[in-house]
Amino acid sequence: MHKLTLAVCPHDTAENPERWFLFAQFLSRHLDEARIEFRPVDGFAAFRETMPAADLVYANPQDGHELCTHYGYRLLARPGNRFDEVVIIADWEAPEAGLAAIHGSTVATVPELLPTCQALEQLAEIGARPAAFLPCDSWLAVVNSVARGQAPFGFVYRDFFDGLGRFSQRMVRVVDRGDTQVLQHAIVLSPAAEPHRRAFSALLGRMHEDEQGRECLDALSISRWETPREAMLEHVGQLRAGCRLESA
């Protein structure tokens, strides 16, 4: 029996990492040809250093694009109900304004992460462009920077923002909530594990029909696994190529 490793985006293991251990156990119990070992890591830097060595990776769109483009991974499955979106926030005490008010303003964001590029693409559609960016090292730092008046606007990963407590959310005002339903986390499969693709695809595709499988999926807030969209990788590449920032 082959031993395969599973790596998971640190954002999805920051809370309740044991649910991914249960997911790996479910796969192991239902696969005759492989045993899956979940190997959590602490932080994005460590994850990106080790992810090319994993057989299965549940990756955000940016890391999935990196693995598929440079390491020969292939998309295996995507969650049917979860999408990567951006929330655009503003200083709560500032006069209420729409997206157009961002034009010529300073925006706090995490520059190297994809939600920043998503927000810029959305703004470009209405002819708006920030004058400069206040770089932050985390989404929490973005929220705090806007709440303290260090920048009038901010870009935040929606999944992170929705996970904040009500008090923290009320520190800022939501200008816009993205709902493009284009980008998603996805499970990608390494070249070494390619011989197991058919078995993985079949098991994941029917996981929601199994009682234990549904319990695992519910714990992950995933309705079911679906066929991945190859066009997503192309869109990620276009977003990254067109994402140009200047620091404030």
Image (cartoon, helix red, strand yellow):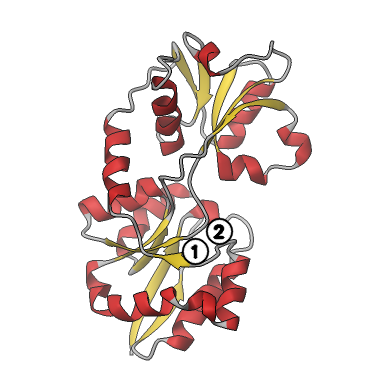
Location of residue 165 (image quadrant)? top right
Q: How many marks?
A: 2
Kindly tell me whether residue 248 is visible in this rendering: no
Residue 98 locus on image (x, y percent): 58, 17
Q: Mark on residue 40?
A: 1
Q: Nearer the viewer, residue 186 or 231?
A: 231
Q: Amino acid at mark 2?
A: Thr
Label 2 environment density (alpha carbons within 10 Å; few <14, some 14–19, many ≥20)? some
Residue 167 locus on image (x, y percent): 78, 36
Q: Amino acid at mark 1?
A: Pro
Secondary structure under badge 1?
loop
Q: Nearer the viewer, mark 2 or mark 1?
A: 2
On screen, residue 152 above or below 235: above
Taking the spot 63% from the left edge, 63% from the top edge, the residue there is 16
Q: Is residue 243 left or right of residue 71?
A: right
Please report contact status of discs 2 and 1: CB closer than 8 Å, yes or no.
Answer: yes
Q: Earlier in the sequence, mark 2 or mark 1?
A: 2
What residue is pinned by disc 2? 13
On screen, residue 161 above or below 242: below
